[in-house]
Image (cartoon, grey):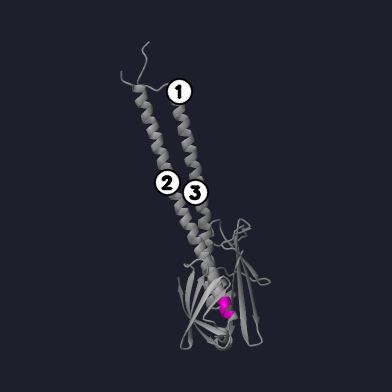
Amino acid sequence: MRKNKKGFTLTEVLVSVAIAGILVVAVATVFIRYQRLENRFEVKENILTEIENIYALYTGSPATFPEDLKNNYNPNIEFTDGKAILYYDGSFRTIRQDASGNYLELEYSSETGEEGYTLYSLKITANYQKEIIKFTENPSFERKIIVGGENEE
Amino acid sequence: MKNKKGSTLLIVMMAFTLFALLSTGISVLFFLNLRLRIKKIEERASYIDLSNAVYQYLNETSVSEIVENEEFSGYTVQVSRSGDNYEIIFQHSENDKIRAEILVRFQGEIYEIYSWRKG
């Protein structure tokens, strides 16, 4: 019988398949990990965009913030005991009507001082998959604005 | 004698090495991109924190208490007066990029922000 020198030996094929397998698994692992991280970063970016938009609305006119929020986001939003929750889809891109594990918790309050001005406060906490997502060392963002006296519109 | 076995194996190994090198290169690019995004996210979040600190500073400071240079909640605050307005530079103590320049007018305890420049 003539030996086919052009072909691969069984050992070569097995070694090649093993190396190819290791490479494919390594590449797939890296890619899956990358995808997961990318999704998480996208969620974080969308959360920050929402927080920036809400603060822009609030800073413009803190006195009318609850109404402005309803008009701009969802007419069903109610601040019960100074707290409202905005539910989002998995990527924090669109608001959902029903409860989900992804939400922004808004704590809103105002107090009028003796001098006649009002101190408004808005604290925003982001939750992703029911867990608080931290962006800085603080678990939430809190902005307080004084309005009143000669500047009150 | 021609070593056909040796050259075939060499080609296969070279193909694998090339694949591994390409994969490593792409992975490095992926993770560099992610690092850049993390940095941008951190900067955006820090900037929101800075904005909140600016409002806190303005709430707690009255005209008579304004100091040219001071530290406030981890930020360096530089104030200069131009007429009735105050130019305030708010900068993160550890990161020069987290910075805002604002123009404010005080009327008693109440402030009015005229302009806000980021960075």
Specify whether disc 3 shares its chain with disc 1.
Answer: yes
Q: Which of A58 and A84 is in front in this view?
A: A58
Q: Where is residue B76 in the image (x, y as percent from the top left)?
A: 52, 73
Residue under the image location 54 percent in, 82 percent down: B67
Residue at numbered disc 2? B26
C-alpha gap between disc 2 and disc 1: 31 Å
Q: Are discs 3 and 1 less than 8 Å apart at CB?
A: no
**Residue B43 vs residue A99, the one in the foreground:** B43
Looking at the rendered structure, whether the residues under marks 3 and 2 are on a common chain is answered as no
Q: In the image, A43: left or right of A79? A: left
- The outermost residue toward the left is B1
Depth check, mark 3 against mark 1: the one in front is: 1
Depth order, front residue of A61/B53: B53
Above or below, B11 against A29 in this view is above
User: Mark 3 vs mark 1: which is more N-terminal?
Assistant: 1
Q: What element carries label 3?
A: helix
The Cα atoms of the two marked residues, 3 and 1, are separated by 34 Å
Instruction: Give the numbered dot on residue A11.
Output: 1
A21 in relation to A65, above or below: above
Residue type at mark 2: give it.
Answer: Ile
Residue A27 falls inside the magenta stretch: no
Q: Name the residue under label 3.
A: A34
Same subunit: marks 2 and 1: no
Quadrant in which the C terminus of chain B appears: bottom left
Amino acid type assigned to the residue bearing label 3 in the image:
Tyr
State the residue lying farthest toward the right: A81
Q: What stretch is highlighted in magenta?
A: B55-59
Q: How crowded is mark 3: few (under 14 residues within 10 Å), some or many (20 or more)?
A: some
Q: Disc 3 versus disc 2: distance between alpha carbons?
A: 11 Å
Q: Can residue A72 be seen in this view?
A: no
Task: Indicate the chain on which mark 1 is placed.
Answer: A
